[in-house]
Amino acid sequence: MDELIQYGPDLAVGFLNNIKLSLIIAVFSLVVGTILAAMRVSPTPVLRAAGTAYVNLVRNTPLTLVLAFCYLGLSDTLGLIFSTEVPLTNSFWLAVLGMSAYTAAFVCEALRSGINTVPMGQAEAARAIGLTFSQSIRLIIFPQAFRAVIAPLGSVLIALIKNTTVVAAAGYTVEVSNVMRTTFDTTGVSIPIFLGIVVAFLILILPIGWYTGWLARRLAVVR
Amino acid sequence: MSASVLFDTPGPRGRLRNHLITGVSALVLLAALGWVLLKFNEKGQFKASLWEPFTTETVWVDFILPGLVGTLTAAVLGAVLALLFGAVFGIARLSDHRWIRLPAAWIVELFRAIPLLLLIFFIWFLAPDVFGGGDYALFAIVLGLTLYNGSVLAEVVRAGINSIPKGQSEAAYAVGLRKSGVMRLILLPQGLTVMMPAVVSQLVVLLKDTALGYFIVYVDLLNMGFKTLPSVYPGTKLVAAIVIGVIYILMAMALSAFATWLEKRSRRSRKTTAGPLEPPGAVPLPPGQPDMGGSVMTQ
């Protein structure tokens, strides 16, 4: 217990960095994922193919490789540098870049399968009563797709939060799992520290799962 | 695109507009690709000396293949143990006895919520204290993969068995089978057909997760290909990343393709009336609509 109290502040700073990363990446990946999803359902074959290729490539690559590629490939080799003075700031944005690119593929898949849950009959009925393209999207398709997408987006968010523990691969070493590792290097393994971090993650993750699950059930479209 | 929820079959004006968008987007994509290639060239990444090592035997025999063996060892051990763990805990969660059901549920929920890398670090540091000195990298990865993916698979098993229509077990009890017989002869065989696609999708996740060995210096594809190899052949980082990236993608895609095939087969299977189970985290589709490959996301 003493170790947890002694190293608590360091670990707390690390955990806050995980939360900060999660929030920024969530915003970026939602934007990019929406664009990708729009590409994948567009009537333009070129855009559809590009979206599909991106999603299949990124989804089948380990996140660790994506992040290490951003760090050692993009930054070290190709010279993509966000901050020349502070290496940690540079790695922070590299981590944001890599994880947003990775998470966007999953956001895209969640959104697209949400659109696929809307039965054809709904669109046909909308056209039959004379709604225009934008009206049928706004009033019929999107509200139903949005509801189907809540729970999967919740799982993506949870996975994203858990995945922020991997960003040390991009050189961002001040997040909680790496802080735990360096602490273990000096003090040896400490069960209280591990359990403390686990509890912190549980407190963050479980409510998200419950809330999105509850919301999805509450708003579920009865078919 | 006539079968889309979003778009009508385009008329003459719509077709013209689509052709225009096609042209413009093709140009934009080509420009982006060209810019990337230009950047690569600017930094001299197309120099033959950087790519040449990957055509030599030593690079493959000394670095990439041993790494691949390490990755596959971890993946296979992890997959087998995770399947066992998932089967045991999935069925335990369906137990009629509260003292079995509740602890199983806690364990499954707990290990699903712990970030895998955190768990692997903890096992890696804990193992020498418990079992004495030695190299516990493989042990930590396999145990971590087993606990995490096993917990996810336990949920898949539970959902698979729950998806079998109630009439099946009722009929089985009615003809005089016991609880174990109902599970073994009626529910599990049907449940297996239903859950196979989701199980294989989770195994893809497990395969990708083996790359976490990078952090605990386990001799896997990522470490050999991305750390050791570029240190022997300076400057090949980017090229090496592309080569091992392609290997990872091919392995994962082959497994995903297998999952899709299983799903198609299970959809037309007459062994059970229940449809195939969605991978964990995917959106359930209305019946009769083709699935476009739901996704599971972790690492």
Image (spheres, coloured by chain):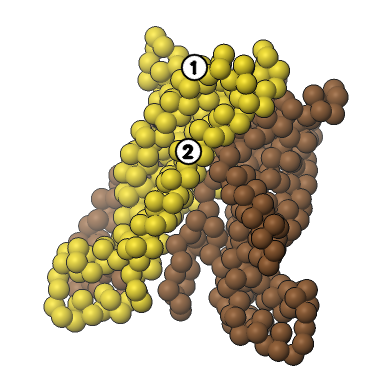
Q: Kindly indicate the quadrant of the structure image that contains residue B184.
A: bottom right
Chain that the image shows in brown:
B
Disc 2 packing (10 Å; few <14; some 14–19; many ≥20): few
Using the image, tell me which numbered label, if any, was put on residue B191.
Answer: none
Q: Earlier in the sequence, mark 2 or mark 1?
A: 1
Using the image, tell me which numbered label, if any, was put on residue A203.
Answer: 2
Look at the image and give the colour of chain A: yellow
Q: Is residue B19 left or right of residue B108?
A: left
Q: Amino acid at mark 1?
A: Pro
Q: Amino acid at mark 2?
A: Ile
Name the quarter where the C terminus of chain A is drawn.
bottom left
Q: Secondary structure at mark 1?
A: helix
The chain containing the residue under callout 2 comes to A
Q: Nearer the viewer, residue B160 or B229?
A: B160
Q: Nearer the viewer, residue A221 or A170?
A: A221
Q: Position of residue B17 (x, y in %)?
A: 20, 62
Q: Kindly indicate the quadrant of the structure image that contains residue A103.
A: top left
Instruction: Tell me if I can see residue B156 in this picture.
Output: yes
Q: Kindly indicate the quadrant of the structure image that contains residue B91.
A: bottom right
Up-down: is A180 above or below A19?
above
Residue shown at 30% from the left, 66% from the top: A144
Disc 1 designates what residue?
Answer: A9
Residue shown at 37% from the left, 20% from the top: A82
Q: Is residue A97 left or right of residue A67?
A: left
Q: What count of labels does the image hold?
A: 2
Residue shown at 29% from the left, 56% from the top: B22
Q: Is residue A8 left or right of residue B21?
A: right
CA gap, disc 2 and disc 1: 18 Å
Up-down: is A9 above or below B11?
above
